[in-house]
Image: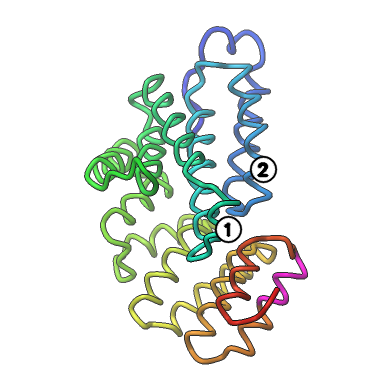
Amino acid sequence: MNIETPLQKEIETDGEVRVRELVRRGRAQRLAFDVPGYEEAVPLLREAIELAPAFAPAYVELSETYSCWGFRRESSCLGFWRELHLLEFQSLYDLAYGYAETALRLAPELAAAHRAMAAALRHGAKADPERRAREAALAAELDPADAENLAERWRVRGYDPDDAAVRHILEMVPALLAVRLDLAAALCERGRYAEALVELEDALRLHPANIQVYYDIAMLLDRKGLRAKALEILGKASSLRSSDPMIKQGFALLGEAV
């Protein structure tokens, strides 16, 4: 995401470098695509907003952080009512929408603001497929050189694993984990397990401490009838962060008490 947009006068004279650095660090944490990263990103981005209340890129990053975090929470309690109570996620989606709305108000010409809104409209009570598609298309039109903009457009077009766009995106930014996981999921849904596993193994090589990568590999192995191997993978994830609800869900889905 390009955050080199013009700043307001208050930042041009005092604190510009600090604000940009906070947003850069927040973005890096978001792109780690895991709960510890989201927990690190939020205070960094809130500080940026306190220092520069009119700097739209900070709102973009905070919105996308909450979108990712909300989906992670929702994905960690599928079918488990106790976890649904403990891991409430709608408030995170609401925050994502609110910050995207602010970003658009501050900088309606900023491609990333439209992308953030598209992401905020993907899940939760405010989900709106039609507006989401419009926002994603506009983001890609405004800045077609940004891999995340292209990725959001690929998603709204149906997550087609054979769309050349997704390969182009991963060539642009091989470490873009969210896209690689989405591609693996799309392949898995079509029964193309071997191809999906290749994507997940690449993801694990690039992000060796990411819990969702381990979880997705375990679920794929279980689909292939390799439950013992799946449990081994979850065990490795548990050794990294045993308290993660996604690990607990994985063991439960595989019939193991935790």
Give 215 or 105, whichever is nearer the viewer: 215
Q: Which residues are magenta?
A: 234-240
Give the image location of residue 182, x and y in percent. Answer: 43, 63
Q: Is residue 123 magenta?
A: no
Residue 238 is a magenta residue? yes
Q: Residues within 10 Å of mark 1 (few under 14, many from 20)?
A: some
* Res 83 label: 1
Residue 86 vs residue 194: left or right?
right
Whether residue 137 is situated above or below residue 197 in the rendered picture? above
- Residue 18 placed where, x, y %? 68, 23
- At horizontal 55% and vertical 76% (from top left) the residue drawn is 253
Residue 96, relative to residue 6: is it above or below? below
Residue at 62% in and 8% down: 13
Kindly state the secondary structure of the residue where label 1 is placed.
helix
In this rendered view, identify the residue nearer to me: 27 or 251: 251
Tag 1: residue type? Glu
Going by the picture, which residue comes out furthest to the right? 239
> Residue beneath label 2, please?
39
- Cα separation, mark 1 vs mark 2, equals 19 Å
Task: Tell whether 70 sits left or right of 129.
Answer: right
Q: Residue at x 61, y 64 (%)?
A: 246
Q: How packed is label 2: few (under 14 Cα within 10 Å), some, or many (20 or more)?
A: some
Q: At numbered mark 2, what does the secondary structure look like: helix, strand or loop?
A: helix
Depicted 61 relative to depicted 53: above or below: below
Task: Tell me the number on the disc at residue 63.
Answer: none
Could you say where residue 250 lies in the image, as x and y percent from the top left? 59, 72
Residue type at mark 2?
Answer: Glu
Q: Magenta stretch: dominant SS?
A: helix
Apparent side of residue 233 relative to residue 221 in the rendered image (left or right)? right
Q: Position of residue 58 (x, y in %)?
A: 54, 28
